[in-house]
Amino acid sequence: MRRLLWIPLLLVALAVPITVLAGSGEGFNGVVGSLEARYSVRATHIPLMGLVSLFTRAGSHGQVANLHIAEFDHFTEPLDTTDVSTLVQQKLGASWERIVLQTSSREQSFIFMRDEHPRIGLFILDHDGHELDVVQLSIDPSQLGQTLHQYTHHHHASDTDSDSVHPVSD
C-alpha cells in the first residue's frame, strides 16, 4: 500500500518540470505567444494537437513528426519581415534559417528550416491578409522524396488536367 502512495508524488514531480518548460516562452509556443502579444490577437489552438501529431507520424510512417499548428483569425496587420526573422531566432534558436520569403500586396509567406540530422525542421508562417497560420514540423527528406515521387509520376498521355502537379526540373 505504501508503494502506491509514491505514484501520485512521482506524477507531481514529473508534471512540475513539464509545466515550467511548456510555459517558458520558448519554442513554438514562444513564437505564438509573442505574436499574440505584439499584434493583440489570440491564436486558435487545435485541441489534442499532441494526439494529432502522433497520428500524423504513424500515418506518414515517420516521414512527418512533431507537428504543431496555430491559427490566428482576423489577423489583418502585415507582418514585419525583420521582426518575424528576429522573433523566430529568439524563440526557436539561431539554427533556424529563413529560406523562403514571399510577399505580395495582401499575402506573406515565411519558411524557416534547420538541420535536425537526419531530419529537417520546418517552421512556416502563412499570412493571407485575413488569417495567419503557423506550423512547425519535422520531416524525413529521404522518405518524403520517395512519397512525392510516387504521386508526381502518375500522369498518362490522356491526362489533360492543367492543375496537375509536375516535378520541377533544373
Image: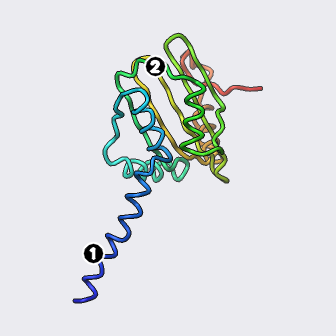
Give the amino acid at mark 1: Pro
Which residue is depicted at the point 44% across and 17% down? 129
The residue positioned farthest toward the left in the image shown: 1
Specify the quadrant of the image occupied by residue 123.
Answer: top right
Q: Secondary structure at mark 2?
A: loop
Which numbered dot is residue 8?
1
* Residue 18 vs residue 167, the one in the foreground: 18
Say which residue appears at 50% left-offset and 26% top-offset.
126
Q: Where in the figure is residue 54, as x and y percent of width and height?
A: 42, 53
x and y percentages locating residue 40 in the rendered image: 37, 27
- Give above or below for 14 relative to 27: below
Q: Position of residue 17 (x, y in %)?
A: 41, 63
Which one is in front, 119 or 23?
A: 23
95 left or right, relative to 43: right
Identify the image quadrant of residue 45.
top left
Residue lying farthest to the right in this orientation = 170
Image colouring: rainbow
**Image quarter of the C terminus:** top right
Q: Nearer the viewer, mark 1 or mark 2?
A: 1
Q: Position of residue 164 (x, y in %)?
A: 56, 22
Which of pointers 1 and 2 lies earlier in the amino acid sequence? 1
Q: Which label number is shown at residue 128?
A: 2
